[in-house]
Amino acid sequence: MAYLVLGNGSVFEGTRIGDTGNVTGELVFTTGMVGYLETLTDPSYAGQIVVQTFPLIGNYGVISEDFEGAPALSGYVVREICTTPSNFRSEGDLNVWLKRNHIPGIAGVDTREITRQIREQGVMNAMICDTIPADTAVLQQYAVTGVVKNVTCRHIMTVPADGTQRYRVVLIDYGAKRNIIRSLTRRGCEVVVVPSDTKAETILGLNPDGVMLSNGPGDPAENTDCIREIAKLIGHVPMFGICLGHQMCALAMGGKTIKLKYGHRGGNQPVTDLEGNRTYMTSQNHGYAVLAESLKEVGTQTFVNANDGSCEGMRYPGKRCFTVQFHPEAHAGPEDTSFLFDRFMDMMAETEGIR
């Protein structure tokens, strides 16, 4: 037996899965019907307890080829966990994998009701525990802080291009998903992955044709050192930012960000292209958003969330820089916006022609 205790006082009784021990985190939900492996290994979930809204999780087992990074989430909540996976690629049972990776979890709880409370009251802290604590002060005190430095790579590493190399791209790793690298290498880019605290001078010294600002966890505004280095890079080299990279680029441009009530997490987020005539389905995982109006003097909003009207993309004229809030590399999720990587390739080609 185990309990999920919410910051609003609600208590849900269920069955312990994964690792033992009590854990506290920010409680969020993701709406993906598939892709639980990518969710579990997405560094952007650092410091959070993740609720899967789809009722059955683990039915296709564990497939290491689908991992997007090292697991960083604090805890895991499901309605039902499958202990008899059936898939030709499966390498084992999900519950065993959760234990091996020291991820505490709970199953057998009403995930619909938990999701409803988050949607109505907003993201809140929660605890997975074996006994209900008499004092829940820890829930009110907890905050997701300092997580980028925990999930970034420790050393510079280079990933060669698939086939003939066309460009060299420096990827600043704030918690990057692996498919960002794959999306670049398959387009002929050598990718040099650097830690989040790498100085702008060092990055420019690598002679990149372009710079990628990756996704990552937490409040973008707390990463003041990263934002300062991004500001030094803007205008010197073509730049493409995703998720946290989008947010920190906006802050480096003098813009502002806000925390959303419950964020966007899942593979079914509709995003409207303001410079075209289409709405795309996108994969997303974030709790903060850029205030587009705070950038009206320096940037142009390019995408908007069709559900709540929040900013989903910015373009900075004259700076060779564009960013998006969603994940064009998907994994898991729709690949409708993968053309943005081609747009980045075109931007580097244009710059190459100017040189």
Image (cartoon, rainbow, N blue to C red):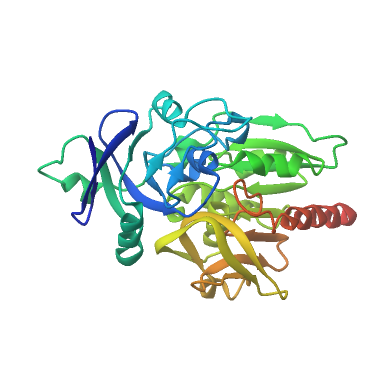
In the rendered image, is residue 207 in sight?
no
In the rendered image, is residue 219 in sight?
yes
Residue in the foreground of this view, choosing between 316 and 125: 125
Q: Is residue 213 above or below residue 178?
A: below
> Residue 3 sits in which quadrant?
top left
> Residue 176 sits in which quadrant?
top right
Most extreme residue toward the left is 134
Q: Is residue 326 above or below residue 193?
A: below
The quadrant of the image that shows the N terminus is top left
Residue in the foreground of this view, choosing between 17 and 23: 17
Residue in the foreground of this view, choosing between 43 and 210: 43
Q: Taking 190 as reference, is 113 left or right?
A: left
Q: Residue at x 11, y 44 (%)?
A: 135
Q: Residue at x 61, y 59 (%)?
A: 282
Q: Is residue 300 above or below residue 65?
A: below
| Image location of residue 263, percent across then percent down | 44, 60
Q: Taking 82 as reference, is 272 left or right?
A: right
Residue in the foreground of this view, choosing between 108 and 282: 108
Q: Residue at x 33, y 40 (%)?
A: 107
| Image location of residue 353, percent across then percent down | 90, 55
The number of discs equals: 0
Q: Taking 43 as reference, is 123 left or right?
A: left
Q: Residue at x 73, y 60 (%)?
A: 320
| Image location of residue 150, percent across then percent down | 45, 35
